[in-house]
Image (cartoon, rainbow, N blue to C red):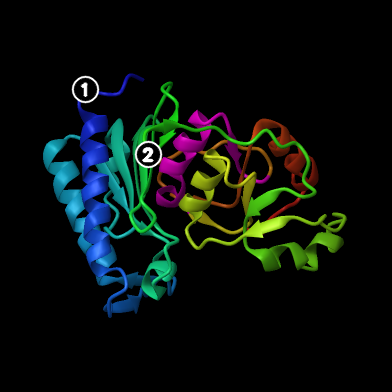
Amino acid sequence: MPVPDGDFVLLKEAVRDAGALAMRYFGTDLRKWSKDADNSPVTEADIAVNDLLQARLTSARPEYGWLSEETEDDAIRLSRRLTWVVDPIDGTRAFARGQPHFVVSVALVADGRPVIAALFNPATDEFFDAAIGGGARLNGRSIHVSNRSEIEGCRIAAFAPMFKHPGWSRAGIPPWPEMDILERNSVAYRIALVACGMADAALALNGKSDWDLAAADLIVTEARGCMTTHDGRPFTYNRESTRHRSLLVAGPALHDAMLARLGAIRLPD
């Protein structure tokens, strides 16, 4: 669907300001605690950035839904055709340790798919954005995924110990070839690195949420990449359940090669 007038400018300005706010906390003695539900970390910066984005975006577009990692879910979003999907700081663990591997992540989702998106790593001054049908950019310059087709020797953004797990051999999957494994705490940032060609692929076989994926999904797709579950299913956002079981991202040829290896794996519920 066409992007409503002014929404892309609104989104990018809000994300830039949110990144500037995050940097006021970065490298300081943060207040931090764990969420009761899943023991994941949260800091005072996550809440402050969330509050800024919610105030800016919902006041300008009160008719849109809102879904954020740091806001209690409101089912009214399910009745809204347009919904903001937000992770105020994706990569909180890295942020709290003073590592520059985090992003502010915001997408506008329409009928289950992102139509505009921005990811901002203010610590490295990397601003990714995309609009459906309009390509993807890093700091204003067009980006695209790599054209690599072979798994061996590829640069993959993933959790390194995963490739040594004994479950691969039990599932009849041959040992992984040598790869250059790039570890980043933020899954959205990993996907963005694929979008700009700094990584060839990204893989995760554990659960992710809408706010981890929606903005990065549009950016890598507009950069001519493919993003699916490990067995090739596309993502749909702003459903009742916001969880997704796995993630595979790469350029088309490498995505096909990875699917051939991964597609038969059955993950536990």
| Position above or below: 29 against 83 | below
Q: Which of the numbered marks, if any, corresponds to residue 139?
A: 2
User: What amino acid type should be assigned to the residue bearing mark 1?
Assistant: Asp
Inter-mark Cα distance, 2 to 1? 22 Å
Q: Which of the numbered marks, if any, corresponds to residue 78?
A: none
Q: Nearer the viewer, residue 76 or 1?
A: 1
**Which type of secondary structure does the marked residue at label 2 adopt?**
loop
Could you say where residue 227 lies in the image, as x and y percent from the top left? 58, 38
Magenta residues?
Answer: 209-230
Could you say where residue 35 lies in the image, as x and y percent from the top left? 36, 73
Asked whether residue 220 is drawn in magenta, I would say yes
Q: Residue at coordinates 58% horizontally, 52% vertically from top-left?
A: 245
Q: Which mark is in front, 2 or 1?
A: 2
In the image, taking residue 264 as reference, residue 89 lies left or right, namely left
Asked whether residue 130 is drawn in magenta, I would say no
**Which type of secondary structure does the marked residue at label 1 adopt?**
loop
User: What amino acid type should be assigned to the residue bearing mark 2?
Assistant: Asn
Q: Which of the numbered marks, if any, corresponds to residue 5?
A: 1
The picture quadrant where one finds residue 6 is top left
